[in-house]
Image (cartoon, rainbow, N blue to C red):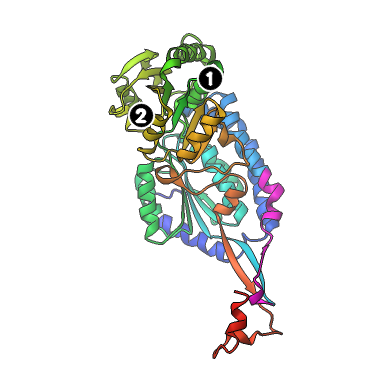
Amino acid sequence: MHYNTLEAIQDLVTRQRCFFLSQATKPVNWRINQLKQLKTAIMAHEEDLYQALWTDLHKSEEEAYLTELSIVINEIDCHIRHLRRWVRPVRVHTPLYLFPSKSRVIREPKGLALIVAPWNYPFNLMMCPLVGAISAGCCAVLKPSPYAPNVADVMDQIVKETFEEQYVALVQGHREVNAMLLEQHFDQIFYTGSPAVGKVVMAAAARHLTPVVLELGGKSPCIVDRDANLDLTAHRLAWGKTINAGQTCIAPDYLLVHESVKEGLVERLMADFERFYGQDAEKSDTFCRIITDKHFNRLSAYLKEGKILCGGKTDATARYIQPTLIEVEPEMRIMQEEIFGPILPIMTFNDINEVITFVNERPKPLALYYFGSKAQARKVLSATTSGGACVNDTVLHVSNPHLPFGGTGNSGMGRYHRKESFLAFSNSRSVLWSSDKIDMAMKYPPYKYIGILKKFV
């Protein structure tokens, strides 16, 4: 069914609300079975997903496996393995003045979830939140990005083959469909995308006081200090910046490098770009393309600013932009907007305190990267704020499923991955169980025993 009218979307939400209220999604065995069916369907469409990711993003099978499929499959396996433990009521301490009561925290599903995913990792960033919604016992409406249409079509097949629409449904369309979905009353909204659209989502959620998880982006700085291991730094930085052609929300957005090591780092970055993708990255089977003409034109405009140190080649027909290093000034446009492409602006510093001030004067980033000594790393981490961070590496903190992932301030709110995904779609319900056999008289008027009570409060 096509959900391209307000009436159709309202009907879908109503049917999902009825299904959720039937209590069908709450049994743990049922949830685990849904996760198993989802895994089976994904594996059955593995080759279709690889082909779709290649068509939409020129993403190689190897990169697609590492950054999309393997992450989702591992997430599913983790929830299947641990869900029975996560759903158990958590016993917490009860103060003596509440004797003989007992206290528990119960994890219950929030209800209906709306999950809106972006185009850059279209499978991963749709399915990982869905795993959390299923695990928590929610129903879900999925809204993929229209900019990755082939992946969206494969995900639509997976969802239709696996779930009833009254439980999980996928809705395709452009901004007008987003607007109609956001008019509905959901119990949780999970949005991944830009800060600008995140504000729109949050404003819509406020009308129903709906809680939100916002996984946004921003300008994630990479700091390279004078004592950094330049060979290792260049290798890890070149990879973190060019994976998915830089279209990664936690990609290093700009580089702050100590003046004394700038030339050496630039030389090594140039060498690593060639080592990864050959002398002509356009011929590489492992270098992705820019998603749309609009994004290509925006990125190409950045190349007119600053001084290009290497790269800069573009091909509008193929939406190809060569890995590029460019010297910039803080006031340039490239330093005002999230880049989301294989262009790395470079600025220099001489004092780490300059860097700390520079970072703190700007919106809080989704990630921060530091290359250098442990002592200086501790100083930078303690004096700045970001959603996540890596010391002497880039991007890989997101690959550790034991680390909660999310932003802060302008880069988002809320966390997910593994148990955090389960908790993101769960309501932590506080329950006090009091005895119906014993009653403490001191809590009642006229409070004759208030003196005794004060000794225990």
Q: Give the amino acid type for the residue marked by disc 1 in the picture.
A: Thr
Q: Going 63% across and 87% down the picture, which residue do you hit?
A: 441
Q: With 457 as the anchor, is 191 left or right in this view? A: left
Front in this rendered view, residue 235 or 156: 235
Q: Quadrant of residue 204?
A: bottom left
Which disc number belongs to residue 86?
A: none
Q: CA distance from mark 2 to mark 1?
A: 20 Å
The span picked out in magenta is 78-99
Give the side of residue 341 with respect to residue 275, left or right: left
Q: Which residue is mark 2?
A: 295
Identity, as a three-letter code, of the amino acid under mark 2: His
Against 317, is 125 above or below? below
Q: Residues within 10 Å of mark 1 (few under 14, many from 20)?
A: many
First-in-chain label (2 vs 1)? 1
Name the residue carrying label 1.
286
Q: In front here: 181 or 135?
A: 135
Is residue 448 on the magenta stretch? no
Residue 434 at what x, y percent from top left?
A: 66, 78
> Label 1's element?
loop
User: Where is the C terminus found, in terms of image quarters?
Assistant: bottom right
